[in-house]
Image (tube, grey):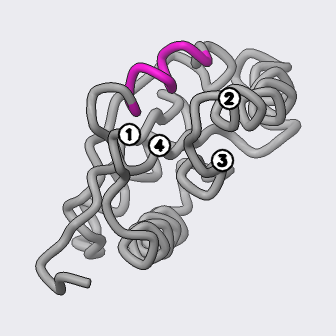
Amino acid sequence: MNSEYQPKIVGLLCNWCSYAGADMAGTSRMSYPPSVRIIRVPCSGRVDPLLVAKCFQQGADGVLISGCHPGDCHYNEGNYHTRRRFALLHNLLDYLGIPKERLRLEWVSASEGRIFSQKVSDFTNELAELGPRSEG
């Protein structure tokens, strides 16, 4: 395993909680690996499974979907849709030959910058252990 390897992670973060948590981590100068590229989405419930597949197709080693804690969604039920869709996404990834460990769902509120930082670090370390995703 190459110690220089940094996995490429796409973070699909809800605007109201997770993105604000990531922002808090940044403004509080909490460090986390630079391996995550953040895309702000209106709600985690709006993340289309085909978008996740496209992230992997374009070379992502992992995809992190993050939203408000269940019961705290700005759109009332968006994160419940996310939770159900996430379960179905594992079937799609299995069909595409992508290990389910490369997809992560985390709930992070706007005040949890430290938790966001820790979740990204943990996911990065787990992906580094798995190594680069093979394109075969």
Q: Give the class, few, some or many, for how many residues have Cα within 10 Å of label 2's Cα (few <14, many ≥20).
A: few
**Number of the front mark, 4 or 1:** 1
Q: Earlier in the sequence, mark 2 or mark 1?
A: 2
Q: Could you say which disc has been placed on residue 105 in the image?
A: 3
Residue carrying label 4: 63
Residue type, label 3 = Leu
**Badge 4 vs badge 1, beta-carbon distance below 8 Å:** no
**Number of the front mark, 3 or 4:** 4
Q: Is residue 120 left or right of residue 93?
A: left
Could you tell me how far apart the alpha carbons at marks 2 and 1 are, in whole angstroms?
Answer: 13 Å
Determine if the magenta segment contains residue 52.
yes
Q: Earlier in the sequence, mark 4 or mark 1?
A: 4
**What are the residue bounds of the magenta stretch?**
49-56
**Number of the front mark, 2 or 1:** 1
Q: Position of residue 110 (x, y in %)?
A: 54, 48
**Number of the front mark, 2 or 3:** 2
Residue located 61% across and 13% down the image: 46
Secondary structure predominantly adopted by residues drawn in magenta: helix
Q: Earlier in the sequence, mark 2 or mark 3?
A: 2
Could you tell me how far apart the alpha carbons at marks 4 and 1 are, in whole angstroms?
Answer: 18 Å
